[in-house]
Amino acid sequence: MAGLSKEMEKALNDQINAELYSAYLYLSMATYCEDQRLKGFANWMVNQSMEEMIHAKKFFDYIIERGGRVKLAEVKAPPTEWSSAKEVFEQALKHEEYITSRINDLAALADRENDRATLNMLQWFIDEQVEEEASVQDVLDKFELLADHPGGMYILDNDLMGRSAPSQASPGE
Ligand code: OFO
């Protein structure tokens, strides 16, 4: 099989950077949550950050498997302050929608190049992005459900403490 086109190699390298930024962003969100004494929220974000590292490694491995060259670039600094835990999750959803659009752009490029192997690899990410958006939306829905409950934040924080670390084999879980 022919190697990756130069354009595809660059686009996949850029996606490694985007996934590493995601990891960095969620880690920063975790520190904000810690600062707010919301340990469950922080736990959710740390585990999300770890999942993003797995996503970055998947692109890393794929470029190498196709005989390409991984070139790591500077990861920009994430924001450090938000107005509330709810805003953190609103911003997380916006970010995931942005990542979904990037994955869709990559798939469109693979399609234009008739690079079926890359399209096939990206299918995993297309499915994963549905899950990524849904899991953030799920937390936002719980904010709404508990909005009028006096202990709402405490209940939600406890709930989010239940998220466990991702395993390499099944990053979506
Ligand atoms: Fe890698 O899915 Fe979130 O950003």
Image (cartoon, rainbow, N blue to C red):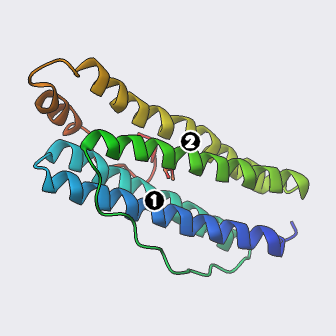
Quadrant of image for the N terminus: bottom right
Task: Tell me which residue sits at (33%, 32%) in the image.
Answer: 139
Residue at the image point whose x is 66% and y is 47% from the top? 101
Horizontal and vertical percent position of residue 119: 77, 50
Name the amino acid type tagged 2: Gln
Q: Is residue 149 left or right of residue 14?
A: left
- What amino acid is found at the position of numbered circle 1 in the picture? Ser
> Would you name the residue on which mark 1 appears?
22
Q: Mark 1, mark 2: which one is toward the viewer?
A: 1
Could you say where residue 33 lies in the image, as x and y percent from the top left?
20, 51
Mark 1 lies within 8 Å of ligand 1 (Cβ measured): yes
Looking at the rendering, which quadrant does residue 85 occupy? top left
Q: Residue at x 27, y 48 (%)?
A: 83
Label 1 sits on a secondary structure element that is helix
As rendered, which of 4 and 130 lies closer to the eye? 130
Q: Disc 2 marks which residue?
A: 129
Mark 2 close to ligand 1, CB under 8 Å: yes
In the image, which disc is placed on residue 171? none
Q: Nearer the viewer, residue 171 or 157?
A: 157
* Circle 2 SS class: helix
x 23%, y 37%: residue: 160
